[in-house]
Image (cartoon, rainbow, N blue to C red):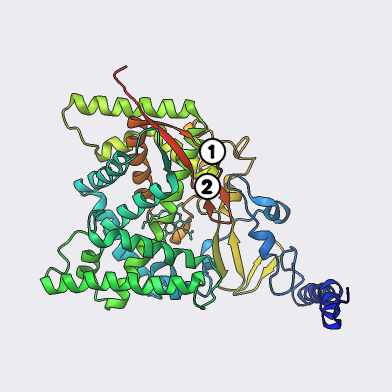
Amino acid sequence: MMIPFSTVLVIIFTIIVSPTIAIVVAQSLKSYRKKRNPKFPRGPMGWPLVGSTFSFFKPHHSSSIGHFMEQNLSRWWWYRRLFRNSLPAHFPKLVGNSSLVLLMGDAYRHKKAILLAFFNKFRLQAGFLHDIERLAGGLLASWSEGGVTYMTENANKFAFYVIVKKALGLTPEDPETEQLRKEFMALYKGLYALPINLPGYTHWKALKARAKVVKTIKKKLDERKAKGSGGEEDDLLGHVIKESTYTPENICDTILGFIFGGVATSSTALCLAVYFLQNCPKAREQMREEHLECMKSKEENGKGKLTWDDYKNMEFTQNVISETLRVGNVAPYVWKKATKDIEFKGYFIPEGTTVITYLAAVHLDSSAFENPEQFNPWRLNTKDVKKANNLLPFGGGVRQCMGSELARVELSIFLHNLILNYDWESVEPDHPVSIPLVSFPKDLPIRVRAVDHSL
Ligand code: HEM
């Protein structure tokens, strides 16, 4: 068989010439870097253009830091004020320029104050825990005994319903809620896809979804204004109307930023908790005892519903949640950028350099946690300062997560309802994979069985 000359050229180029060019460019970049800044921290340059992207994003178990990080990790503690948030260039188009994570300086401080006041306000509302309890109970009641339940879908619904109730006052029964969830998920997928704006691509679909989500938020805003009820509702939309002079676009970005912060994070954490408890019957039993005890005291005092004090008294449950976040690494790292030239321990980091703070490496540090990859909620019973310092699931400093308490409440209440009503087992093996966000390749299928506590 004759091979055309053009094909031979392509093969020669692909096999011999292109790797040669790649190696030459990589070598020259290395020497360029050494010449220009010999004090830059060492590490592989990887391939031209793509660098070490593929090694960095290689899927690995979420209870490990992955091969690339094992090879290239150095432990440094930075002064946080020397860094600012740094997100990929396509984020503003999807999240919105005025969303909190993208703001800096005075605009950031102003919006943060408004959001903090909202978080503190709803925490004190009696209805806050009951809303979450109702949403958890409603979802669990729809599970069929003996059938297969996909935990990722259920956790996503739960986290979305909680956030959208707080953001826009929407309930699962409202006609637009489910549609909004689907559009929001299409938008969310765009964050971690290549920003190719061509029909059919994830980024293109995400931009279309954003337009629909923004339209729904604007419609709600217009309805409130038409009713003349601007800031009377106790959701975030009402709060922002009342407390700010933001434009409608800015209000939409504020709401969208809030939804972005709270959906994928809490739902992944919930799946991880179900996964770790499923594989640790002893922890499941101890948790069940804690929640039965809680219910017994409620029946005795005739109050029935969960209160803020009940949540605060769920000590073992809080350890289960902390250990889930430590081993599961929902947000394995945060991207930051140097705000000025930094000289540190003989190294020199020029202004504008992107730095990844790898939270998962802190969580899986064997000098702080024995067998760090193992789920062991009892290890957090102590007041060990080193362990406490090594727990950073919500980041730290000025930019620390604003929804950490909300996430803990959501998980505690969902697990309270789950553990009191059901026992569950895995339908087929499925493990959390970090790519780099955590996901379950088979959507974590479980089979539930109702439990009878009178036996
Ligand atoms: C288990 C669940 C969650 C995890 C693991 C998590 C983790 C994080 C992390 C690591 C950061 C960045 C911190 C930094 O840069 O140092 C962050 C920021 C943020 N999170 Fe969360 N989060 C969770 C749930 C939530 C929830 C429920 C909300 C509610 C809306 C929320 C809202 C936010 C906001 C608004 C920010 C930006 C804060 C700022 O820039 O000042 N998060 N979160």
Specify the quadrant that holds the C terminus.
top left
Task: Answer left or right for 125 relative to 372.
Answer: left
Which SS class for mark 1? loop
In the image, 281: left or right of 347? Answer: left
Q: Which amino acid does label 1 sit on?
A: Glu
> Neighbour class for label 2 at 10 Å: few (<14), some, many (≥20)?
some
Crowding at mark 1 (Cα within 10 Å: few <14, some 14-19, many 20+): few
Which mark, by number, is residue 349?
none
Residue occupied by mark 1: 428
Q: Nearer the viewer, residue 34 or 267?
A: 267
- Residue 168 visible at all: no
Q: Name the residue under label 2.
A: 442
Image quarter of residue 16: bottom right
Picture layout, residue 270 above or below residue 118: above
Rendered view: 54 above or below 378 = below
Q: Image quadrant of residue 348?
A: bottom right
In the image, 117: left or right of 152?
left
Q: Which residue is drawn at 33% across and 33% down?
A: 313
**What's the residue at 69%, 60% (across, down)?**
55
- Rounded to the nearest angstrom, the CA distance separating label 2 from label 1 is 8 Å
Seen as rendered, the residue at the extreme bottom is 6
* Residue 264: % across, % down: 43, 55
